[in-house]
Image: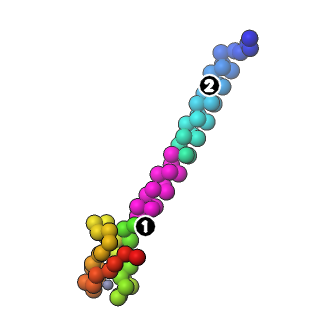
Amino acid sequence: MIRLELATAVAIYTFVTVIGVLLLWITLGREKKITQYTSWKKHIWQCAICTHTYVDSRHEVISRCPQCGSYNKRG
Ligand SMILES: [Zn+2]
């Protein structure tokens, strides 16, 4: 059996817990950033007529340009 002092055992336990929380924070933060970026990119439109760039999160296939009023198709 390994003999440890109480202070050493508490220090090791705290160190391992902090490292675990940091690893979880880093891995979960990366996944969230990727999903936010892809969902934002889906809602950005650029008008084919006046080249105005705008955000429209309500329409998926066809969107109307707020600058000139023309319709833009995805793809
Ligand atoms: Zn336009």
Mark 1 and mark 2 in contact? Answer it, CB < 8 Å.
no
In this picture, residue 56 sits left or right of residue 2: left
Q: Amino acid at mark 2?
A: Tyr
Mark 2 CB lies closer than 8 A to ligand 1: no
Q: Position of residue 12 (x, y in %)?
A: 66, 25
Any part of residue 53 in sight = no
49 with respect to 25 (left or right) = left
x, y (%) of residue 60? 32, 68
Tell whether 49 sits left or right of 2.
Answer: left
Which percent across, then down, holds residue 48?
Answer: 37, 85
Magenta-drawn stretch, dominant element (helix, strand or loop): helix
In this rendering, the answer to whether 55 lies above or below 21 is below
At mark 2, the secondary structure is: helix
Q: Quadrant of the N terminus?
A: top right
How many marks the image carries: the answer is: 2
Q: Residue at x 41, y 61 (%)?
A: 39
Q: Where are the magenta residues, as a range?
A: 28-40
Q: Position of residue 58 (x, y in %)?
A: 28, 66
Amino acid type of the residue that numbered disc 1 sits on in the rendered structure:
Lys
Please tell me the numbered disc located at residue 64.
none
Rendered image: mark on residue 13: 2
Q: Which mark is residue 41?
A: 1
Q: Earlier in the sequence, mark 1 or mark 2?
A: 2
- Image quarter (top left, top right, bottom left or bottom right) of the C terminus: bottom left
Identify the residue at image location x=66%, y=20%.
9
Residue 2 in the magenta stretch? The answer is no
Residue at position x 71%, y 15% from top? 4
Dot 1 beta carbon under 8 Å from ligand 1: no
Q: Does any portion of residue 58 appear in the rendered image?
A: yes
**From mark 1 to mark 2, how far is it between C-alphas?**
43 Å
